Amino acid sequence: MDPIKTLEFNKILEKLAENAQTSTAKSRCLALRPSLTEAEARRWMDESTQSKRIIELAGPPPLSSMTDLQQIIALMNIEGILMPDQITHVLAFIVSCRRMKGYLRRAETSESDIAWYGRSIEELKALETEIEQCIRNGIVVDKASAKLEGLRRRAAETSCQIKEKLDALLRKNKLWFSESFISVRNGCYTLPVKREHKKDVAGTVIEMSNSGGTCFIEPASVGRLHTLLRDLMVEEDCEVRRILYVLTARISDCLPQIRLNMEAMETLDFLFAKGKLSLSMNASPVGINTQREIRIIDAKHPLLSPDSAVPLNLDMGRENKGVVITGPNTGGKTVAMKTVGLLSLMAQSGLHVPAHPASSFCMHHLILCDIGDGQSIAENLSTFSSHMKNIIEVLKQVSDESLVLFDELGSGTDPAEGMGIAIAVLDALCEKGCMFMVTTHYPEVKEYALNTTGLVNARMAFDQNSLMPLYRLELGKAGESCALHIAEKLGMPRKILERAQEACYGYQRERFSLPVAEKEKAAEEVATQKIIAQQEPGPIKEAFQPAFGIGDSVLVYPQKETGIVYASPNQKGEVGVQVKGVKKLVNHKRIKLQIPAKELYPENYDFSIIFDSVANRKARRIMERRHEEGNIIIRKEGEMEA
């Protein structure tokens, strides 16, 4: 799996790009990847810190989008003439550079190295002034040159003369015209003459109305003036082109400085985008180390609402390189694990993370993960097949400098075999010496983590009273899936719950959905049973209804070894099984009944013949007849009274 997408680092980069103005900076944001060099990662982190400090001190930076600026420069490279709107874009960039230089000059008091970028920005004041004198609101102004001003004045006077003559004709012969106003048709000043009076007005017919009842005629009396106006407009257009050519040449002369300014502004845009992102996430700079240690204090997932997200605290890598997280579904196991992976990617990319500044992240050569079901109809992959494919690929790439994240390790197949695969994979990760986090529901994996050096159990806190997840990670403790509690809360019938619990644990551990008085009575009974259990070794016969009897022949998974039950389930649901002469406690879920004892042995059979040593049997017979000093029964560790 690609950790960039799986851990949603791409969404963080999209948020980063939203804070950039230029297309180049946006592309740079989206292409950001974790550094593999500690010095570089720390330098990037320091840049984020400096840009954030400057924004807090001096406010938002005066950046421009530099829209179409690259196209404008490309046009000048082929000696094209810039139009007024294009020159306006150049002017906006020059003004932005001048303002940025002043902004960074004020920011030098913050003692940030970024502020010194301002000294590399060229202020093109002469070019800025010349453009402002010639172009305003996207057009060349009259004051751009004396000649242009004179031409436009004469053209305006000529236009007024034409209108005066036409107005006089309208007033003098109102009956000839269908309307009392002057129309401009095909660039000519015309009068709307009724068709029957067409011959009364000397001139050129420029256009006819749709109905044919009106002729738009340019009177001969204004023909000379109109010719003069056209000549003036041609001269004006030539003068405007000359001015644009001169401005284009001025801009071309300043292209080296403009290009340097563009590079500086694009770099600043990227750096300030990191500062803006930090402010928007209320993030902080964190430590970066190469000691293979991760210390997370009060961290929150950056894509969750900061008001509802529960802070995450984690310390791993010193004594514990692996963390096995257990707890109920929807309890936040996956979110906690993804938070660790995502924040590691952010820190190694030089981005601030939403955590306490005392937090520290180590450098990883690779972050590898298997999260989600990964089903694919196109590739004919089931959930389990997808998991296996990803896990195999991870094991090929993992090294002692990797961080591995596995969600629901061993799920999607037979529980006994899935548990075996989970433990085998954890063994392989321990041998590789990498840091890893896994989530699981297997009790055997919890026990494996408890008894394996370098591993630690963790659980997601769960309120047993309200049956609500608390989304708080607690190290050093194994959690329960709480599936029956959640099913009860969702409304599953009581009989089904009791049957499910009996099938699961081999006894009815507690009652469901009882009235308050009955619940209190049941609680008193359980408390009494616990006191008896502390005083008397072995299971509580009245509290539990064992699913396995003494002498039953069973199969023990995942090894599929044949054994004989020598002790009923204890309070943890562990059954005493003798396998090849060795007695051990095995979780009832790993045991399958083959042949019940009543089919193997006669009634009232003495099982001490099978389970006791010769010395113990002899000692037991003597003790049944009389007391003898020094006569003891030796019971190996893990044995229970049959």
Image (cartoon, rainbow, N blue to C red):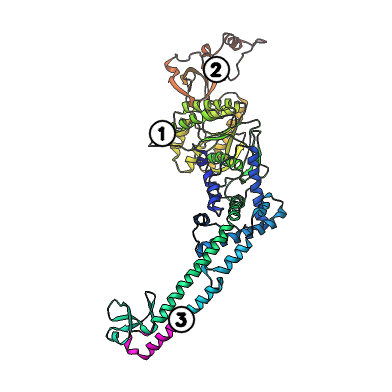
Earlier along the polypeptide chain: callout 2 or callout 3? Answer: 3
Q: Point out the stretch of residues depicted in magenta.
A: 157-181
Examine the structure image and report whether residue 46 is included in the region drawn in magenta: no
Left or right: where 227 falls relative to 342? left
Residue under the point 49% across and 79% down: 154
Q: For marks 2 and 3, give the CA distance.
A: 117 Å
Residue 620: x percent and y percent? 59, 12
Label 3: few (<14), some (14–19) or many (≥20) C-alpha neighbours in 10 Å: many
Earlier along the polypeptide chain: callout 2 or callout 1? Answer: 1
Quarter of the view holding residue 192: bottom left
Label 2: few (<14), some (14–19) or many (≥20) C-alpha neighbours in 10 Å: many
Left or right: where 290 falls relative to 210? right
- The local secondary structure at tag 1 comes to loop
The reply to whether residue 152 is visible in this rendering is yes
Q: Main secondary structure of the magenta part?
A: helix
Which residue in the structure is indicated by mark 1?
A: 382
Residue under the point 41% across and 79% down: 226
The count of marks equals 3
Residue under the point 48% across and 29% down: 392
Residue type pointed to by label 2: Lys
Asked if disc 2 and disc 3 are in contact, CB closer than 8 Å, the reply is: no
Label 1: few (<14), some (14–19) or many (≥20) C-alpha neighbours in 10 Å: some
Q: For marks 3 and 1, give the CA distance.
A: 84 Å
Which residue in the structure is indicated by mark 2?
A: 583
Which residue in the structure is indicated by mark 3?
A: 158
